[in-house]
Amino acid sequence: MIVIGTFISLILTQIFADVLDGIHRSQNRHMSALMVLGNIESFAVSLEKQSEKMGRNDTVGRWFLAQPLAYLDTMSLEELDKLINEALNMNFINRDRTAEKIFESTIDTWDNMDNVAFIDNAGQCFSQMNSVEVFWNDWVKETKNIANEIAGNSDQYPGTSIPSKYMHNEEMRHRMARIHDWRCWMGYVADFMRYLNKQNMQVIGVSDKELDAFIKDLADITEKEQGGHEGRPMSTDYYTPQLNLDSLNTMPPILLQ
């Protein structure tokens, strides 16, 4: 009887250990899923902010393109410098790939759990995110290279100042005209990321409330690790009020506040 009792005890202990291990693995999968979903949502937010900021580039750029080149050649360098910076100051996309690496390292686990839909959607999101990052950063880099080429060899380009020389250059004008397209495109990609992420949340069983709480907790942890935001300069504090075409048409002169 003692042998039988010991044998049953061992079996129950193993079953209990397996159950705990299963719960632990399930919790890890859920946490990994939250990291993936949170990363995709954060990327969508960053694209939205980039798109909003580019409204400023687009407005000033369209004003530049509407002006006769002869008129731009008569404007003061101070006026042109402020305006050209408004039009061409665009940021690179730099995103955290930690969640993507975790996703890639656990694909077999998701596959074994019959989460093919999650793998497909999350994989499509990360692929799209990578493509957007590479394309946009290349485009911004090429635009800056063209500007640097003109500025560094100004005697080879027509115009009375560096900013006016930019506008005499057809490639630079073409790129300035495309800012509107890229702004709209980023807004579309952000919404498309959210569309796929909603499907991911349904497959995994994550609610909007749970994801929002996870993202907030992650932001709080990051803030504590960085010592909080007190006294920390924020880029948004340095943005000037957005210009519009009506105010730009009062030129010259216009001093940006």
Image (cartoon, helix red, strand yellow):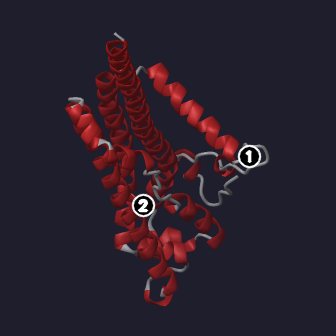
- Left/right placement of residue 69 relative to residue 129 reads right
Vertical side of 229 occupied by 202: above or below: above
Whether residue 121 can be seen here: no
> If you read the primary sequence from the N terminus, does the residue marked by circle 2 or circle 1 appear first?
2
Vertical side of 250 occupied by 144: above or below: below
Q: In this orientation, which residue lies closer to the viewer: 132 or 69?
A: 132
Q: In this orientation, which residue lies closer to the viewer: 5 or 110?
A: 5
In the rendered image, residue 109, in percent from the top left (x then y), is placed at 28, 37
Residue name at image x 33 percent, y 39 percent: 188
Residue name at image x 37 percent, y 65 percent: 138
Q: In this orientation, which residue lies closer to the viewer: 14 or 127?
A: 14
Q: Quadrant of residue 117?
A: top left
Q: Which residue is mark 2?
A: 65
Residue name at image x 47 percent, y 40 percent: 42
- Left/right placement of residue 64 relative to residue 83 reads left
Whether residue 60 can be seen here: yes
Tell me if mark 2 has few (under 14), some (14-19) or many (20+) residues whose alpha carbon lies within 10 angstroms of its own: some
Q: The disc labelled 2 sits on which kind of residue? A: Leu
Residue name at image x 59 percent, y 31 percent: 217
Q: Which numbered dot is residue 227?
A: 1
In the rendered image, residue 243, in percent from the top left (x then y), is placed at 57, 48
